[in-house]
Amino acid sequence: MVRGRTESADRVVEAAGAVVWRPSAYERAEVLLVHRPKYDDWSFPKGKLEPGERAPAAAVREVAEETRIRVALGPPMPPVRYPLAGGAVKVVRYWQAVPLDDGADFTPGPEVDRRAWLRIGEAARQLTHPRDRSLLTTLTTRTTRPLVLVRHGSALSRRGWTGGDLERPLGDEGHTQAAELVGALAAYGITRVVSSPARRCVETVLPYATAAGVRIETEPAFAEGTDPELVGEQALRLLDAPEPTAVCTHRPTLPDLWTGLGVTPMPLQPGEAVVLHLAGRTPVAFERHPPAEPLSGR
C-alpha cells in the first residue's frame, strides 16, 4: 500500500471499502449500496482496518461481512477523507469491485439491515452523503483484469549460501513478506500464479498458491539473467492472458518485463508487489504494495 499521508498517525482512522458494480439490462451498470440502521444512511460498504491488515484485504472483508457478497477488486478510486468527533480524521480507501457471487445468504443485522442494487442515477439520489455521490462519479464501469508483478522476498545472503543460486531460499523476513502477500493477491481474485524457477521466487508465492488452491507455473524466461528478448515475449503473453495473474521474478529481470509490458520501469523492494489493471492489453491503473516489515537490504 502507498503510505504517505499528511495527517498524524494518531489522529487518523484508516478504513477501506468498495464500489461494487455489475452490468444490468440495456448495458446499464448497477452499484451496490447498504443501509446502516445506526445512522439511518445509505452508503457504500466499508469499514475500519483490523490491526496489521492491508487495505485491499480489508475492503474485500468488509464487503463480505456487510453484504455476504464476495468480490474481486478492480482499479483504485480516490480516497475519501472526513472529520470525526474529537478531531480525528477518517481516511477511506476505495476500489472498484465486481461480485463473484450473489450473497444469497444475506440476512439483516444491526450493522447493515438492507442492501440494494441500483442503477447509477438511482444510486446517486439514494446515497446520503455528498462525499459518496462525488466518489460515484469516478466509477468507470470498465472491465479490467489484474496483472500483479512481485519481486521475490528477502532471501538468504549469497555470501552465506553454499548451494546453487537457483536453490537459495527465502530468509525469515522473506517468509514474512510472502505471508503478507496472501491477502493482497486474494483481494484481486488471482487465479493464475507464474514464477521464476528460482526457489526464492517460488517460495514467495507459495503461501498464496496453497491458500487459493492453484498450482505455480514455473517460467524459465522470468529467471535471473534471461535474454531480454525472451522476457519481452513472455510479457506480451501476459498481456494476452485472460486470467487474473501474478508473476514473481527478480530485480534484474524486472526492467525487461516492464519494458515488454509497455510500462515505465520502476524499482521494487524485496517482497513488493505492483498491481497493473489491464483493459485489453492496456494498463489503465496501477498500485504499489510494499512490504510492511523492515527490509534487510537483500
Image (cartoon, helix red, strand yellow):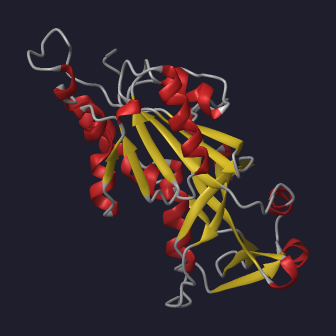
Query: Position of 289 compared to 36: left or right?
Result: left
Q: Position of residue 231 (x, y in %)?
A: 49, 29
Is 30 located above or below residue 275 in the figure? below
Is 153 located above or below residue 188 in the figure? above
Is 103 located above or below residue 50 in the figure? below
Say which quadrant the N terminus sits in: top right
State the residue at coordinates (66%, 24%): 264
Q: Nearer the viewer, residue 62 or 232?
A: 232
Query: Position of 247 compared to 11: left or right?
Result: left
Q: Nearer the viewer, residue 195 or 289?
A: 195
State the residue at coordinates (48%, 55%): 57
How many numbered circles are shown? Answer: 0
State the residue at coordinates (28%, 50%): 207
Q: Position of residue 34 (x, y in %)?
A: 68, 77
Q: Nearer the viewer, residue 87 or 186?
A: 186
Query: Position of 49 compared to 85: left or right?
Result: left
Q: Position of residue 19 (x, y in %)?
A: 70, 64
Q: Position of residue 294 (x, y in %)?
A: 35, 24
State the residue at coordinates (87%, 58%): 137
| Residue 271 seen | no
